[in-house]
Image (spheres, helix red, strand yellow):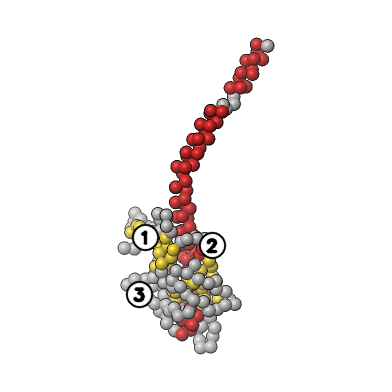
Amino acid sequence: MHTSGRSADQHGNLGFTLIELLVTVTLLAILMMLAAPSMMEWVRNSKVRAVGEALQNGLREAQSESLRRSRQVVFALTDSKSTSASPAFTAKADGNHWTVRALPSIAGESSAFVSSGVLTDVGAGVTITGPAAVCFNSVGRMVANASTALTTLTGGESCSVDIATPPAYDIALEGADRPLRVLVTLGGQVRMCDPKKTMSDANPDGCPA
């Protein structure tokens, strides 16, 4: 009987007491409260990056399509979803959709739908500051275009080229601490960078000064 009592005591000592359980739950709650701000910041930064990557991919697709088709292609932001069935759209600098279209190369030819996407699907609340439209010529370089064929398609927006200041899309979200920028060079290269850093050997992900 004495041995059985000792065995019961040993089994009882293996479990948690109510006080130990309450202490554990309290500590877990405190740790979660401490981690919550960092987690929310990570979520916001992830949204900014997702939109930046979507813009970067859309611009790269436009540039590669201009080479593949050997014709001028426009990348544009818009507030309406563009499809092959609805060729016209209104380009807008802070639009939450993007579209890529091949422009007519000869009179009487129609534009060709390439692709489109929705930025709010990957980053709700993210703001974009940049040009409404960017055009690439048949060799993949940026080109200015104010033709009727383009402005009729985009609702009045044209493509411009500033040698001193190539186009850039700044992407930000309130509460995020890592804004991003998507740059397009005159040669057609597309690159995403961190505007809080200056590009150097130590900061290859930074933006040019």
Q: Label 1 sits on what residue type?
A: Pro
Distance CA(mark 3)–CA(mark 2) = 31 Å
> Pointer 3: what residue?
162
The residue indicated by pointer 2 is 121
What is the CA distance from the residue labelled 1 to the residue labelled 3?
Answer: 20 Å
Q: Amino acid at mark 2?
A: Asp
Q: Name the residue rendered at 47%, 50% in the picture.
A: 40
Across and down, in percent, residue 17 comes to 56, 26
**Residue 143 pos. (x, y %):** 41, 77
Q: Which image quarter: residue 158? A: bottom left
Return the residue at label 1: 195
Image quarter in which the N terminus is found = top right
Q: Which mark is residue 175?
A: none
Disc 3, SS: loop
Position of 199 relative to 101 (above/below): above
Q: Crowding at label 2, few (<14), some or many (≥20) Cα neighbours within 10 Å? A: few
Viewer-side label of 1, 2? 2
Which one is in front in this view, the residue at disc 3 or the one at disc 2? 2
Q: Are marks 1 and 2 in contact (CB under 8 Å)?
A: no
